[in-house]
Amino acid sequence: MCRWVAYRGAQCFLEDLVTSPAHSLIDQSQCATEAKTATNGDGFGIAWYGERDEPGHYRDILPAWSDDNLRSLARQIASPLFLAHIRASTAGRTTRDNCHPFVHGRWSFMHNGQLSHFERLERVLEARLDDQLYSARKGSTDSELLFLLALEFGLEDHPKQALEAAIGFVISRAQALGLQPLIRFTAALSDGASLYCVRFATDKFAPTLYSGRMTGHAHDSYCLVSEPFDEDTHRWSEIPAGSFVSVTDAGIDVAPFRPAVSPRAIAV
Amino acid sequence: MCRWVAYRGAQCFLEDLVTSPAHSLIDQSQCATEAKTATNGDGFGIAWYGERDEPGHYRDILPAWSDDNLRSLARQIASPLFLAHIRASTAGRTTRDNCHPFVHGRWSFMHNGQLSHFERLERVLEARLDDQLYSARKGSTDSELLFLLALEFGLEDHPKQALEAAIGFVISRAQALGLQPLIRFTAALSDGASLYCVRFATDKFAPTLYSGRMTGHAHDSYCLVSEPFDEDTHRWSEIPAGSFVSVTDAGIDVAPFRPAVSPRAIAV
Amino acid sequence: MCRWVAYRGAQCFLEDLVTSPAHSLIDQSQCATEAKTATNGDGFGIAWYGERDEPGHYRDILPAWSDDNLRSLARQIASPLFLAHIRASTAGRTTRDNCHPFVHGRWSFMHNGQLSHFERLERVLEARLDDQLYSARKGSTDSELLFLLALEFGLEDHPKQALEAAIGFVISRAQALGLQPLIRFTAALSDGASLYCVRFATDKFAPTLYSGRMTGHAHDSYCLVSEPFDEDTHRWSEIPAGSFVSVTDAGIDVAPFRPAVSPRAIAV
Amino acid sequence: MCRWVAYRGAQCFLEDLVTSPAHSLIDQSQCATEAKTATNGDGFGIAWYGERDEPGHYRDILPAWSDDNLRSLARQIASPLFLAHIRASTAGRTTRDNCHPFVHGRWSFMHNGQLSHFERLERVLEARLDDQLYSARKGSTDSELLFLLALEFGLEDHPKQALEAAIGFVISRAQALGLQPLIRFTAALSDGASLYCVRFATDKFAPTLYSGRMTGHAHDSYCLVSEPFDEDTHRWSEIPAGSFVSVTDAGIDVAPFRPAVSPRAIAV
């Protein structure tokens, strides 16, 4: 299971959230306290928004804790909006193309969770992509394919509905193949303006998601994390399962996230 | 354009063909004299047959000339049947999964050449694979996909016919899409018993292929190469375009290679 | 802290000890039960003896658990004498040249432990090497330097005495600099004929070392490990701290290991 | 022989000099027209100055032309002062720590050239470093060691004199060992404020160095390159051998570079 942090707010060095805290993302990669697998050594990545429309993108397959490049980049690069991810492989091999975040045009996406029966679902899911999105697939992960499906279902215009449609499509395809759908999906994504997050699962075990208002920054700076950086319980709020989070200039908003499938599909 | 060597005969250290000759495969990777692109620095790989049914397999994305591991392995490993390849990328990114040789069960495969319009053909070619072969695809190259298509068309039972059918299928799919088919295909493959090679193109520019009887080995040792190692013109015989080569215990045999498409498709 | 296995006996596939057991070396790399650091993701290496005088050598900086090359090599290569190591960095950066085992001519060496104050000791220790051994140093680890010191002190002729002299030299150099010597040193090394291991520390915390006779092999096959592969307490014998182990055709022998320094230096 | 570009002037995206020109640094890495070795595939690096005192630093061992990370970073990062380098190995193995530029505190340094007899000189040169600079050495190249020697001789206070002293020291050490000194040294370095370059050799073959005023930028933007990006002969001025170049707010200045050794040492 992976670990990630997403940030939107006052310009901030990536270092402040990726390296510096007592329990930073990199610390978590070596000893995550809430993760199912203790070690997150299967690569890492960052995507950040700067002066270009599309985000900067840096990924590598080393353990994050041993990458001098990451340390220097996180120290140099400041951004008002970025995603950072450390991977523990569940599906897809350890290659740069399988490391999160994934980037498509202006959009970036990262994910923690799992999609059961992916080896049987992959082909029917991929078949739903148009030719352009099919060609855009570079790796072999379930996560990148979910991102491309969301783009197929209209992510650029209606993020929440597109993600609900994409997850709903996966559930219905699994049912059509006689499989018990099991999706655990805690994700962050951005178009460079807003930051969106989802916490969802078809069972009771949606991977954790917390939001934190950042001290030392302007009032509208938010950090969304798969696991809190510290034990300051006043700072971190758990986002309930079945939520869609939007962070915009208007602040943070949490809405229900309901994939467009029959209720029976969401087994509990 | 890539460079490769395939060997079948008396047990021989990989070093003897990959490192030691004056103009070895590694030398070629830095300064190929007949290749279109001067530099072959986009990864390399070896597949060799030993005590197991399936071949050993080592690939990496470094330039071959700077890989200590390759040098040590080539020095230690002796085999009666092996393939070695150095890649210059034409399609597919530089990842281990895109490096030749490709391995599937007992079979190994490597390729030098090109398949035009691959970005438009990839999806229809992939669609022809059965679910198991679809799942076996790990990279994004045209070469690996041609290998899987050959398996789909019966490579394990009838290598020559399966390869003719696979190439013919690609040509007919290109025509169906209104594309002028252009395939240049010089490949080596093996099931651990026999060594097979193809030299073929739809135009006049089939990538070169040479066979050489190895001195210092038993009479039935053959080396098939994309480019001769030395200027000993007595040693190397050019294999004509449109050929299928079999190296077995019975020696070397060269037969016509005729993809199963209408004559008009093979434009000259 | 690192994990390793060394084997001498009937020819055996590396896979049998590196991959296959329920609690294999690769399993240990993700979840070591006796190690100080839970994760061993800072590279790995193997050295094995075959038909050449010098060992084969394969190292990489990926986590061992995600390296397809290692899996294939371990499955193909059989050897009567080999070392395998998975690294958790304590000194020296994550590069191939810092991965164990280290090889020098016929000799191979790997290590689990630590050498305190290495940043102050490195220069005086390196100064003790002759020009040839100085030039042979490729990485920046304390382990490789200890190996070269042992070579300087006569490893090729008298392994036990050379290692005692090397460790003793380190202790005396530390004392000369006014430092409290702290060495924890559990190592394996070989010249291709015999296998030698040491378990030693200047305090009470010598890293663990176990020997096991291998079932299913001839009577003289031994496996020396930093941590047992399974809970079969009949199989594994703990080697006491302060021991030098020799595995030869005559079987296994355990002798006291006493670095050549004044008794006062071995503080407890 | 390596290829590099150094820039000081109006803030500029790294992409504009590393990727975009018809004959960019990356193009040069695949087909350098003036270099001794045609291929520069042994790694690359960038160092750039931004909001921190010390430069950002990114290096990797892949061929530059296949690194998506480099492409994205060069597109995102804008800087008024940066160095970029593509390596063809002459001494030192292909590791990140051997890739240029090297960084020490505020200083960055990169080099194209060679130092003959380095295998015999390395130890006496390293011995000249104080303990702190000795510990700062991470790789095994002659280039990094020359940089550390320049720091030892006062680079931070008197760049020209320190470099002259360092090169002079190398020449005198070579003579003391009875070796014919041969140094070819075309280097760029910076403290984040000024940009300095050297073109020097003990024989007639100092590696080339050109300066170019950048169009489309403010009048004080300069690009120093090992080889011109294009055939615009009005744009590029060759810097003569034996020169020290300073680029500051006052513009570009070229002074003689005279290592502090007896004239006899500079054999022609």
Image: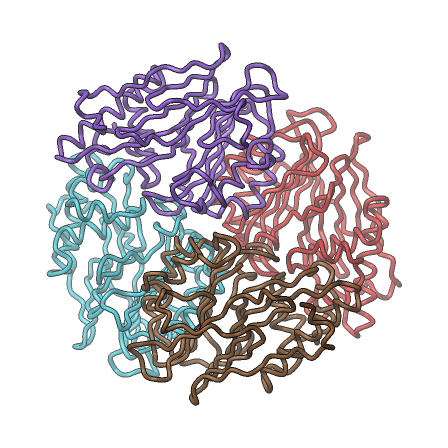
Chain colours: A red, B brown, C cyan, D purple
> Residue C103: x percent and y percent?
27, 58
Position above or below: A113 against C215: above
Q: Is residue D30 left or right of residue B148?
A: left
Position above or below: D185 against B139: above
Residue at left offset 59%, top offset 68%? B185
In the foreground, A204 or C218: C218
Residue at left offset 15%, top offset 50%? C152
Assign the N terminus of chain A to one quadrant of the image: bottom right
In the foreground, C223 or D190: D190
Assign the C terminus of chain A to one quadrant of the image: bottom right
Q: Is residue C71 visible from the viewing direction of this image?
A: no
> Residue A119: x percent and y percent?
68, 69
Residue C101 is drawn in which quadrant? bottom left
Q: Is residue C267 left or right of residue B17?
A: left
> Residue C107: x percent and y percent?
22, 61
In the foreground, B69 or B184: B184
The residue most toward the bottom is B250
The residue most toward the top is D250
Residue at left offset 27%, top offset 50%? C144
Q: Is residue A219 visible from the viewing direction of this image?
A: yes
In the foreground, D158 or D181: D181
> Residue C48: x percent and y percent?
31, 67
Position above or below: A73 against B106: above
Residue D156 is drawn in which quadrant? top left
Q: Is residue D115 left or right of residue C168?
A: right
Give the tally of numbered discs.
Answer: 0
